[in-house]
Image (cartoon, rainbow, N blue to C red):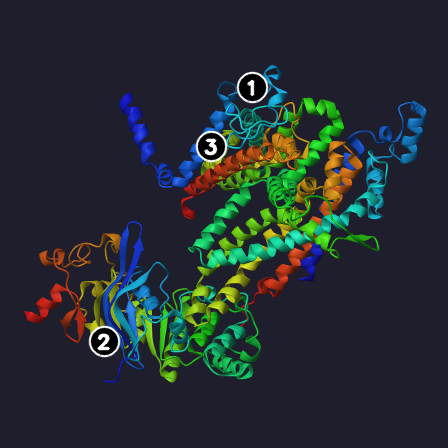
Amino acid sequence: MLAFILRRLFQSVIVMLAVAFVSFVMFNFVGDPVNAMVGQDTTMQDREALREKLGLNDPMPIRFARFVGNALQGNFGLSYRTAEPVGRMIAERLPATLELSLVAATFALIVGLMMGVYTGLYRNSWLSRLFMTLSLIGVSLPPFMVGILLILVFAVLLGWLPSFGRGDVVKIGGWTTGFLTVSGWKALILPAVTLGLFQMTLITRLVRAEMLEVLRTDYIKFARARGLSNRAVNFGHALKNTLVPVITITGLQLGAIIAFAIITETVFSWPGIGLLFIQSVYFADIPVMSTYLVMIGLIFVIINLIVDLLYFAVDPRLRIGGGGGH
Amino acid sequence: MAEPVLEVKNLRVEFPTRRGTLVAVDDVSFSIAPGEVLGVVGESGAGKSMTGSAVIGLLTPPGRVAAGEIRLMGRRIDKLPYGEMRKIRGRQIGAIFQDPLTSLNPLYRIGDQLVETILTHLPMTKAEARARAIGLLKEVGIPGAEDRIDHYPHQFSGGMRQRVVIALALCCNPTLIIADEPTTALDVSIQAQIITLLKRLCAEHGCSVMLVTHDMGVIAETADRVAVMYAGRIAEIGPVRDVIKHAHHPYTRGLMGAIPTISEREGRLNQIDGAMPRLNAIPRGCAFNPRCPEVFDRCRVDRPDLMRAGGSLAACWKAEEAVNG
Amino acid sequence: MIARLSDGLRRALDSDIFYSFRNSPLTILSAVVTLIFFIGAFFSPWLAPHNPFDVATLNLMDAFTPPVWLPEGNPIYPIGTDDQGRDLLSAIMYGTRVSLVVGFCSVAFAMVLGVSLGLISGYFGGMVDSVIMRVADVQLTFPAILIALLLDGVVRGLMGTEQHDNLALMVLVFSIGLSYWVQYARTVRGSVLVERNKEYVQAARVIGLPSVLIMIRHVLPNVLGPVLVIATINLALAVITEATLSFLGVGLPPTQPSLGTLIRIGNGFLFSGEWWITVFPGIALAVFVLAVNLLGDWLRDALNPRLR
């Protein structure tokens, strides 16, 4: 088990290096960092001196090593657009995105799981058919459309909920949170639903498919033949066996939520890193883009590691080697 | 004669499909006396497993009991609501399925599966249930039961897993065990052990057995009586010795021909030509007539019901001739 | 000749695929809807009631006309007009055309790229294979929209925003295509690995035939079904991705509006009550994607009898 985790850790480091390399290449070869830093009237000599000072003339491997070293210390250079340190820009906006993603993911997971189990168990009831139809529509509606429709109904027509911003936030250390105020929660509802809806439909469909699959297995039939209660069979034996694939896909989906936050944040003017990223794409602000890439990569790698550890918690076949000893 | 443990009368199992209703089990009647082992034999698709599933009330939907009745210790059980039937399953009727590799939930320790079954049906504390589980594992011949109880199914071999399944079937002292092809998925060398074990334990616990198999050899060794099924109906039923020695139905004789014996030196097993008809294409008259070596005109028109033939009952016009003529 | 034609037709009508098509009203409906969208979009210059890009016909007085069933609606503009006085229905038809062009081109690009890389990966194996497949793995962990956004940003950085807008359509096709090749490559590679060890390939090698050609001839028909299914579902995804990029403002500029651009434009008027400018293009997008998704689902089931 330890060997497995070490191997996964090693793979994670490799993936991170690959992502860092892509980011480094973007940083160094797309646009000229020197151009971005100096004015129009800087002489060639000054530029060359700056290049030398920044180490841009060093060999590639050294520059890459320096890039990684800087990144590890949270130093990602200056934004072309605002000339602020990118690390600080991201750190300021990260709480907004993480809070939004967390709420959206929780919503997607809980509602998706419940709807999936229900539609798997009672697949012919009218409520199941309704859920499945809604989920099909949910998959086909682009997330930004969902956001627009929610704004139209709940903000414009009904006027119940705000349509942009985070509401009042409270600052705790370096972290700004909207969880502590009523207006913060109200502002969170529409974006979180928008962001979570797509993942929720995916989870619903996945759990349903897995439930149907598991309910057909011999051990479920045998569990019924042993006279176990419906609850023990459905929620103990069946649900637990659907968890391994559900964890895999859900893990990936939760990573995707952070990326999809780009869209939601644009629709709701949510001051997170997604909005920052889209602005940087618009201005070809490469340092911000490449930093965002590294950070998303890191989040994905961490999620994948957690998913691997969850496998071990759920499935004894991974935890304990077979043997069939007599 | 004592009251039978299980009595099945004119059982009919149907599968409504889009292209019409399939009759998987048709007019099947039999009974099992206390302590008796009834073998049910036939090719795959003959309806033997379906009969077993109908008895424990676990037909896969849309399959359903369309007619007939099933009585356990005189009590009618085929119309029981799900909750009532659940209390009978595992408590009064134990089940053993074909594949021990897939019968056990891979994510639960075998001890947990035993304990949850015992606690579902018997008024016991957890500790008592666990002690009983260890006792059962010892009984089915699992060495080191005290340690093994906390192992997961994948840590056991196929034969050992089937022993665990047997322990699960027996854990509440049922009056009847339905064993559906209990040895088919196992190595040949282990099959005999499992069958012997099953027979011994059922005798010790005093429970009757409905042993579903396609292996006439297993029946010959184990069963007291045998029912031969073909295309959803019983072709022949009677005491094992009578059926084996004087089979009255040509299909039964065909099945016998498929058992290898050491004495025969010809080196060739007899087999029945052709295949069993599909459920949506059962021929008129006797369902076996297209494959029967002794077929005559009447077989193609009238369907024979079970009739007395020697010590057993057979659904064959030849048998009628033999008795009358 | 006619006999042969009618014979072929009859066989096509008897086939399993057509049978499953005929027996699924939802599939027929989706096919009809998809067809309506195709026709409406590709023949928009002839079918659309107005030309939304002909500045001469635009009348600012007509701007913000609501749909015809609302007070102040005008029967000339059945579902209203936008801020410039453009007929919304015509704009949607033209916009759908742009969306479909981007969708089809990027699917074609992704397909060619993915199928080729899959063939190469499966045929050569070894280092080439592992490099391609590792890249595919890493790329698969990131959502396609993010990849497309990054690529778009990189291209913008390389050529400058102005030039980017001129070439927006190409850039989009490139970015979206490059984010969806993985599935094709995996499917084709799997099939090549199966075929590679078959006897006819070995035999061809022995007699000195170029086994590459033979394999391509045998592999491609095998993967046709799965590739078609992936392509159908990808078309829906590509259209959504394009709309999303355009909505985010990094896709097609307002001078060349796709459905996403129209939604983006309309989004600005949501609060002033002109909801139709954004809702109708949105509905058009959702309905089209839903129909294509349903067709893709059906195709997958029909081509894969084991799933039925």
* Image vertical order of residue B289 relative to residue A49, above or below: below
* Image vertical order of residue A137 relative to residue A248, above or below: above
Q: Mark 3 near mark 2, Cβ–Cβ under 8 Å?
A: no
Work out which quarter of the rendered image holds the N terminus of chain B and state it.
bottom left
Locate residue C62, reporting x and y percent.
Answer: 59, 23
Mark 1 and mark 2 on one chain: no
Disc 1 sits on a residue from what chain? Answer: C
Dot 2 surroundings within 10 Å: few (below 14), some, or many (20 or more)?
Answer: some
Q: Which residue is mark 3?
A: C34
**Callout 3, which amino acid?**
Thr
For residue C51, the mark is 1
Q: CA distance from mark 3 to mark 2?
A: 70 Å
* Image vertical order of residue C243 relative to residue A119, above or below: above
* Residue at screen point 49% across, 78% down: B119
Q: Nearer the viewer, mark 1 or mark 2?
A: 1
Mark 1 and mark 3 on one chain: yes
Q: CA distance from mark 1 to mark 2?
A: 93 Å
Dot 1 surroundings within 10 Å: few (below 14), some, or many (20 or more)?
Answer: some
Q: CA distance from mark 1 to mark 3?
A: 23 Å
* Residue at screen point 38% across, 84% down: B204
**Callout 2, which amino acid?**
Arg
Disc 3 sits on a residue from what chain? Answer: C
For residue B241, the mark is 2
* Residue at screen point 75% across, 42% down: A292
Q: Nearer the viewer, residue C167 or C205?
A: C167
